[in-house]
Image (cartoon, rainbow, N blue to C red):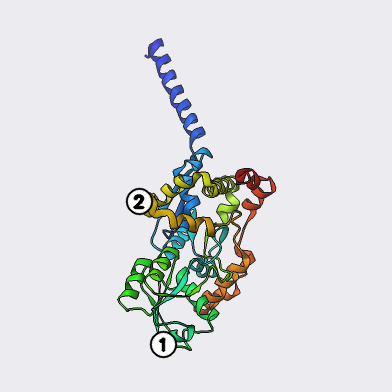
């Protein structure tokens, strides 16, 4: 038989367990796993939101997971291993055409960051005929940008015998140019600056050409959008605060430190060009664009005809951004800066 004091002790112990469990349930933070598919300064607001504890301030447990390539990121999204993918729409479209219920809710990069850079002896578009052009993976952003660039220059890879090769990321493509294994390559801002400084020719800067193109987005399954609307809106709110922190020139040094850390640069000063790229190419109101998405659909459909039936407007859900704008959040968070 239990003594009176032992019964009191047991009751107190059980009460403590219940209270601890209740407190834990109350303090548990919603978790969002985000796969980031490329190391680019366009991701600076995401890195800032994490490194400057903005996600924490909003009560979110956000994990940024770097994966190699948009295809893997979107496959993880389709499999339910992550809740959000930061990836090129080009890698999403075939999955959506096959029946995956995925939508884009924020436009991280609404323009192509690539320049078509060629060997010094290639001075005009016609000189590319019969030549080798390097991109990253087929179907990815650099590959799609290559097709756009060729058409803009009046060229067609098949008709003009231009061989498009998968030759890795910017460092690999730069090395291939120097070794003359490539006649031209799609390069991002800093790689372009380096190669032009060595005498290579910038035939077409897609950003300056103002060609509509949806380069990178945040995407989620429709059931995340509809099933966790408050969590998604808070997540989006935190990211916009990351944008505001990035755009505030008073934070330049801190933002460069974030970029240097996440791009694993040798020094903070090496982040200067990447900082300028973020300042110039990020949008203060990062709505995904239907016009840019239609451009992606057009070129991906050449490889996968099923994609042609997709409607750009149906692939975009900007409800969280619209809610923030309607309450005046953008004006408040930017505060004129």
Label number found at residue 331: none
300 in relation to 86, above or below = below
Q: Position of residue 248 (x, y in %)?
A: 54, 46
Tell me which corner region of the image, top left, top right, bottom left or bottom right, holds residue 168.
bottom left
Residue at label 2?
A: 267
Q: Position of residue 91 (x, y in %)?
A: 48, 67
Q: Position of residue 202 (x, y in %)?
A: 45, 74
Q: Nearer the viewer, residue 199 or 212?
A: 199
Q: Nearer the viewer, residue 230 or 130?
A: 130
Q: Is residue 325 left or right of residue 251?
A: right
Q: Position of residue 197 (x, y in %)?
A: 39, 69
Q: Is residue 136 visible?
A: no
For the view shown, which residue lies furthest in the top direction? 4
Q: Is residue 211 left or right of residue 18?
A: right
269 in relation to 190, above or below = above
Residue at label 1?
A: 130
Kind of element beneath mark 2: loop
Quadrant, the N terminus: top left
Q: Is residue 124 visible?
A: yes
Q: Residues within 10 Å of mark 1 (few under 14, many from 20)?
A: some
Marks 1 and 2, the one that precedes in the sequence:
1
């Amino acid at each position: 038989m239990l003594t009176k004091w032992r019964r009191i002790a047991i009751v107190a112990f059980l009460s403590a367990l219940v209270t601890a469990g209740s407190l834990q349930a109350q303090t548990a933070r919603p978790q969002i796993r985000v796969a980031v598919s490329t190391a680019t300064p366009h991701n600076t607001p995401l890195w800032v939101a994490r490194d400057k504890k903005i996600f924490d301030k909003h009560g979110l447990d956000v994990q940024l997971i770097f994966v190699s390539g948009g295809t893997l990121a979107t496959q993880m999204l389709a499999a339910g291993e992550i809740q959000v993918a930061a990836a090129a729409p080009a890698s999403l479209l075939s999955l959506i055409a096959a029946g995956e219920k995925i939508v884009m809710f924020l436009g991280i990069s609404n323009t192509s960051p690539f320049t078509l850079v060629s060997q010094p002896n290639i001075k005009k578009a016609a000189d590319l005929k019969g030549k080798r052009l390097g991109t990253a993976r087929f179907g990815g952003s650099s590959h799609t940008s290559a097709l756009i660039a060729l058409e803009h220059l009046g060229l067609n890879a098949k008709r003009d015998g231009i061989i498009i090769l998968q030759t890795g990321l910017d460092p690999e493509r730069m090395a291939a140019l120097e070794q003359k294994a490539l006649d031209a390559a799609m390069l991002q801002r800093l790689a372009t600056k380096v190669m032009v400084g060595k005498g290579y020719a910038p035939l077409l800067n897609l950003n300056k050409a103002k060609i509509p193109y949806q380069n990178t987005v945040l995407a989620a399954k429709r059931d995340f959008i509809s099933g966790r609307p408050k969590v998604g809106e808070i997540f989006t709110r935190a990211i916009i605060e990351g944008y505001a922190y990035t755009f505030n020139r008073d934070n330049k040094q801190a933002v460069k430190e974030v970029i240097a850390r996440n791009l694993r640069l040798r020094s903070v000063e090496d982040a200067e060009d990447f900082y300028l790229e973020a300042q110039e190419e990020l949008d203060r109101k990062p709505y995904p664009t239907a016009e840019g998405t239609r451009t992606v659909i057009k070129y991906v459909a050449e490889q996968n005809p099923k994609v042609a039936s997709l409607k750009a407007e149906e692939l975009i859900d900007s409800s969280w951004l619209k809610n923030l704008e309607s309450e005046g959040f953008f004006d408040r968070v930017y505060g004129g800066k």
